[in-house]
Amino acid sequence: MPRKCFLLALIICLLLSGAVARAADSYAVTFERNAAVKMRDGITLRADIYRPQSEGKFPVLLQRTPYDKNSGVNFGLKAAARGYVVIFEDVRGRYASEGDWYTFKNESNDGFDTVEWAASLPYSNGRVGMFGGSYVGATQMLAAIARPTLPESAPWSQPAIITMAGRTRAAHSNSGSMSHGPLAWRRTHSIAPSATIPTL
């Protein structure tokens, strides 16, 4: 558990990137339940959005989960009060989202489309970070495979099958993996060969 807390703290610190003073402020929070996120093939996924009730644009923390987005309430409220837009999305075919769920099949395209949607929200500053472990870690890896301009991510304990799927900008660690490299957010450089995840 301490390693997971460290990784989450790391991604939050990375997202600050010059907005430390604002993130230390306390904001009233507004909540939108089951926001529609349209995928390229017409399927609608549903997301819960927690955000500061304030003018301005804020960095986004995104989690795409098959485990029920309702589990994110406590974190969503706390992080939004500190100056983040927090989005928990049910992946395709799970809970509130449309479509059929096939393990890993749609996570690359759906992840890419969701990151683009999150970055373009009117209260988003365009910086999107993803976090979480297990299958949620896999959703980050597969979004990264969709194209190299991936968001910052801090996955841990991702399934071994994903570590064999291709290159990402994540570096292996004892607790799974975490992102590294220059912060260019959704406009990162090409994937470097040194950033491959080792086959287990």
Image (cartoon, rainbow, N blue to C red):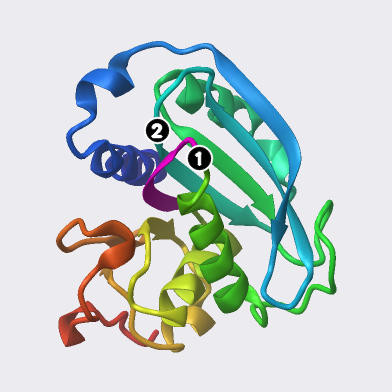
Horizontal side of 37 relative to 94 (left or right) equals left
- Front-lying residue, 103 or 99: 99
Q: Is residue 173 visible?
A: no
State the quadrant of the C terminus.
bottom left
Q: Which residues are magenta?
A: 122-131
State the quadrant of the N terminus.
top left
- Identity, as a three-letter code, of the amino acid under mark 1: Pro
Q: Which residue is disc 2 drawn over?
A: 57
Rendered view: 123 above or below 41:
above
Q: Earlier in the sequence, mark 1 or mark 2?
A: 2
Rendered view: 103 above or below 137:
below
Q: Residue at x 40, y 51 (%)?
A: 128
Dominant SS of magenta comes to strand
Horizontal side of 131 relative to 45 (left or right) equals left
Element marked by disc 1: loop
Contact flag, marks 1 and 2 (Cβ < 8 Å): yes
Horizontal side of 125 relative to 46 (left or right) equals left
Q: Residues within 10 Å of mark 1 (few under 14, many from 20)?
A: few
Give the x, y percent position of residue 58.
39, 34
Q: Give the image quarter of residue 45.
A: bottom right
Rendered view: 2 above or below 108:
above
Q: CA distance from mark 1 to mark 2?
A: 7 Å
Q: Which residue is disc 1 drawn over?
A: 122
Q: Magenta span has 149?
A: no
Give the x, y percent position of residue 186.
34, 62
Q: Residue at x 50, y 59 (%)?
A: 115
Element marked by disc 2: loop
Horizontal side of 125 relative to 189 (left or right) equals right
- Front-lying residue, 134 or 52: 52
Rendered view: 183 above or below 2:
below
- Identity, as a three-letter code, of the amino acid under mark 2: Lys
